[in-house]
């Protein structure tokens, strides 16, 4: 996962009042890092409206289905310490994904392996700094 996660795409002190704001913020970070074109943010929101990206352990993995707006495979990691109500589930960690082709399948599988381990998921939710997140995911 080292090739798709940059330290500048890890933000540990984000705020959002709704899951839509959180998804949009993930998209904005992917735009800021040059991974996607701006229309990808709306594609992420559309995907979230059709099916929740909540995966458990306080984590959501928002992503869009508009591959034509993906410039390169990338992920971002955003922590929302105050938490977000995600259709009745509390979420504190969002991992946004941008992938060309079917790259999202491999990224989701790799992330699932990490996030389905309660200890590793907790490590990410409680990471004291960007370096700790990078160490856990790369």
Image: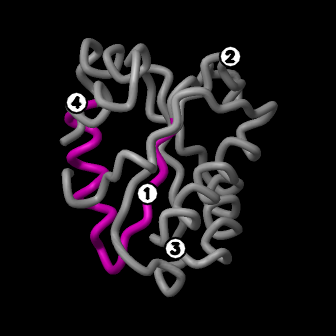
Relative to 88, say whether 67 is above or below.
below
Q: Is residue 113 magenta?
A: yes
Residue 106: quarter of image: bottom left
10 Å neighbourhood of mark 2: few (<14), some, or many (≥20)? Answer: few
The residue beneath circle 2 is: 82
What segment is highlighted magenta in the picture?
94-114
Q: Secondary structure at mark 1?
A: strand
Q: Secondary structure at mark 2?
A: strand
Q: Is residue 67 magenta?
A: no
Residue 97: numbered disc? 1
Residue 136: numbered disc? 4
Could you tell me residue 65's position as x and y percent? Answer: 52, 71
In this rendering, would 59 be left or right of 32?
left
Residue 36: numbered disc? 3
**N-term-proximal mark, 4 vs 1:** 1
In this rendering, would 126 be left or right of 28?
left
């Amino acid at each position: 996962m080292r090739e798709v996660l940059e330290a500048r795409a890890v933000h540990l002190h984000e705020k959002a009042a709704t899951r839509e704001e959180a998804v949009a913020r993930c998209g904005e970070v992917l735009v800021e890092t040059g991974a996607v074109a701006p229309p990808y943010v709306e594609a992420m929101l559309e995907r979230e409206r059709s099916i929740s990206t909540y995966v458990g352990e306080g984590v959501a993995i928002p992503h869009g289905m508009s591959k034509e707006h993906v410039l390169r495979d990338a992920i971002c990691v955003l922590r929302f310490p105050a938490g977000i109500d995600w259709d009745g589930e509390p979420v504190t960690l969002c991992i946004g994904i941008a992938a060309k082709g079917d790259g999202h399948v491999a990224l989701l599988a790799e992330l699932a392996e990490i996030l389905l381990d309660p200890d590793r998921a907790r490590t990410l939710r409680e990471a004291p700094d960007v370096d700790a997140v990078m160490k856990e995911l790369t």
